[in-house]
Image (cartoon, helix red, strand yellow):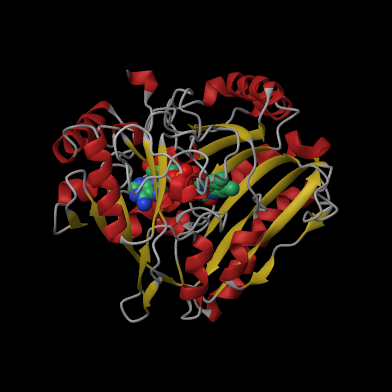
Amino acid sequence: MSHDEAPMIGTDITPFRPPGTPEYAEAGASFQLAAPVDPAGAFTARSVDDVVRAVAAARRSGRPLRLTTTGHAIGRTGPLTDSLLVRPLLDAPVRVDPDARTARVPAGKTWGDVLPETTRYGLTALHGSSSTVGVIGYLLGGGLSFYGRRFGLAANSVRSLTVVLADGQVVEVSAAHRPELFWALRGGGGGFGVVVAAEIDLIPMRRIVTGMAVWNAADAARLAPVWQAWARTAPPEITTSLRALSLPPLPFLPPYLAGKRVLALDGAVIAPTEPDLPAARRIVDEMLSPLTALAQPVANTWAEAAPQALPLIHLDPPQPVASYSDSALIHEIGEADWARILDAGPNLLALELRQLGGGFADTPANGGALDRFAAPLHYYGVGPAGEETTRDLKAVRSALEPSLTGFTAPNFVDDFERPQRTHDDDTRARVERVRRAVDPTGLFAGDVAATRDQD
Ligand SMILES: Cc1cc2nc3c(=O)[nH]c(=O)nc-3n(C[C@H](O)[C@H](O)[C@H](O)COP(=O)(O)OP(=O)(O)OC[C@H]3O[C@@H](n4cnc5c(N)ncnc54)[C@H](O)[C@@H]3O)c2cc1C
């Protein structure tokens, strides 16, 4: 039987296609291989009209409508079984307005699609560490960028969103139009509609200083507290990530990382104009000198670079993987706790601490439901899907206990069963009110990130 003749499930769910069809496989393709993607029907929307048709079909069928772009976080929300899955992958270009310093990004684009369009004008965006991440999903979840200590969360750089609501209306949402929905969409945890485009602010960025310094794992517990002390008073021009890495011998990795256990310090310093470069280099020197005085790095690639180099520096996996992870916003780590934390996850690929503070902690004008992080550090642990990783993640969490704030950065949550909390109770109640107003029948209810610790 050709896929055109494949039977539809239940009532007519056109344009969604059933399991076993190539269209279903294409729409459900996911970067996260550890979470099952088994909706009752799936559809890749190539236009805003397609999205409107999908919303209408889901409403008619009485099934919940779920969203995916890359599937990086497909495990963040509950099982997809019985729902319909729409993947908005619009056939529309990224449009940059260099004078206004904005970009209009259609749904489906990754940062890898956007950056070549902006950097040709000497502009960049508050993107994350990987070019494979979907722009809309990243922005709606806050967005932790290596430019963030200067410019804050990426969600604050959103000027407007175009959204297909549960009733099929296509609405422009901004600080001036439907401000309450605009507020809730930015960090509220999903379940408001399908965002079909985002207009974002761009920032001038001619050069950056970026790279990675790498030490033997044996030196990690001595070096990490020194980094933490530096991070406390570091200038906002720099944002870094300190990771205990244990990466397999993959061909795309440099020899000092492939198959080795190491401590790695990467990130970026901004140099918006050429004359900013000497100061940017000095900031890196000031960060590295107390560390190199304690232990010589086995590699150090920190150097001046074009902003296009930044998504390559963190060495995120370029291909789909099956992984388990955990994350939390944390207070500073006590001097005596470092060794226990760093040793708690021997099978993890990475145990990361991202430097927050600076612009991440500032309250912006017109921010959304999630517009800042007060915590000084963000923890993220990840390993291959399996029991060893589950055990290690639990052990790291328990070692981190004295530092846990009880809050998480929603972008890094990819397991709906793991407790998480993003908002205080008042913010959460306000988000729920907006959700009920725009989606009274709960068409998008399955797309809401779980906040189980409060339920
Ligand atoms: C390798 C890697 C590196 C990462 N680095 C960073 C980083 O540096 N900083 C950071 O902040 N995060 C980072 N993340 C996390 C990433 O930002 C989140 O997982 C984000 O949610 C991914 O969005 P997506 O659209 O790619 O994923 P998806 O799983 O496709 O979508 C996740 C959720 O986003 C929402 N969503 C997606 N598209 C739409 C849409 N069109 N309309 C409405 N809602 C939508 C939905 O609620 C969906 O459930 C990283 C993730 C990975 C895997």
Image coordinates of residue 25 in percent, x first then y, are 53, 45
Image coordinates of residue 65 in percent, x first then y, are 32, 38
Query: Which residue is at a point 32% across and 60% down the rendered structure image?
Result: 197
Along the horizontal axis of the image, is 372 left or right of 279? left
Vertically, is 178 above or below 205? above
- Residue 40 visible in the current orientation: yes
* Pick the front one: 235 or 147: 147
- Tally of numbered discs: 0
Along the horizontal axis of the image, is 267 left or right of 256? left
- Residue 142 visible in the current orientation: no
Image coordinates of residue 294 in percent, x first then y, are 79, 45
Query: Which residue is at a point 59% across and 40% down the rendered structure image?
Result: 353
Image coordinates of residue 45 in percent, x first then y, are 37, 55
Quadrant in which the C terminus appears: top left
Dividing the picture into quadrants, the one containing residue 196 is bottom left
Vertically, is 353 above or below 102? above
Query: Which residue is at a point 44% across and 65% down the rendered structure image?
Result: 125
Vertically, is 230 above or below 177? above
Dividing the picture into quadrants, the one containing residue 334 is top right
* Pick the front one: 260 or 45: 45
